Amino acid sequence: MIVRWFGHSCFLFYSKKGTRILTDPYAETVSYPFPPLTCEIVVVSHEHQDHNAVWRIMGDPFLVKRTNPGLCEFEVPLKLTGETFIFKGLPVYHDEALGRKRGPNTIFLWRMDGYSICHLGDLGHPLNEEQVNAIGKVDILLLPVGGGKQVLDGKEATLVVHSLQPSFVFPMHYKTASVDMGLDSVDEFLRLMTQVERLNGNQFEVNTVPKQSTVVVFDYPVKRG
């Protein structure tokens, strides 16, 4: 399985059979260079413009997003690749005040090529025991770390890692040379983690899982112009 990061919370997953799953595409107001993308499935964690710009995706992808207050589940069969994906959506919040400040958020879980994937969206509060148990085993965790009173900060993100014990952690939603948005950089989070791998690009291939939680930090081009 290949994973590519396009900045912010937007990742593209490629299965061995060719299925492409994209998470949280952002609007033009987010200053990362957004390439032409085609995929079969788009996952949207919540309805903010830096996460729900499905209109930027070419083709006619199946949209996975939560439309009711409770748990949700989608079964998506794909004739093109012969694969079927099951997505589970766990309702959480964008803030520590039960969504009263920034609204709802959804944690999405699915499997690809035998790996369990968890995208936390804009999680803005620590996970409780019930939520940790509902998430279960995680091979790949996509984790917001930028704080800024918007999402988990570095310390809170570290507690989530300790709770879920994922094999890989992909930090997201943090300040970079392209995007500020009042966020912190990834550095605070990295200082609290022991196993960190920095990439020279935005692509990572998952072949095996490490015994210890490993943070993989992607690199992506700076803003246009």
Image: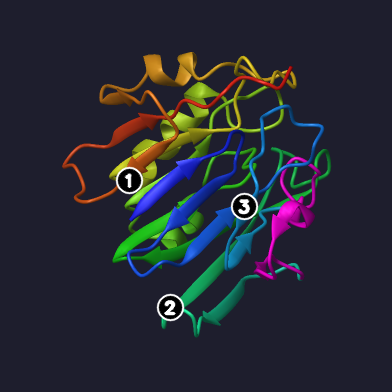
Q: Secondary structure at mark 3?
A: strand
**Residue indicated by mark 1:** 166
**Quadrant of the image for the C terminus?**
top right
What amino acid is at disc 2?
Answer: Thr
| Mark 3 nearby-residue class (10 Å; few <14, some 14–19, many ≥20) | few
Q: Is residue 190 above or below residue 117?
A: above
In terms of secondary structure, what is the magenta stretch mainly?
Answer: loop
Task: Report the span colored magenta.
Answer: 47-67
> Considering the image in quadrants, where does the N terminus appear?
bottom left
Magenta span contains residue 63: yes
Q: Position of residue 100 (x, y in %)?
A: 83, 44
Coloured how?
A: rainbow
Q: Which mark is residue 37?
A: 3
Quick one: label 1, few (<14), some, or many (20+) residues within 10 Å?
many
Find residue 160 and report its horizontal and vertical position in percent: 44, 39
User: Which residue occupies the extreme left position in the image?
Assistant: 211
Helix, strand or loop at label 2? It is loop
Per the image, the residue denoted by label 2 is 81
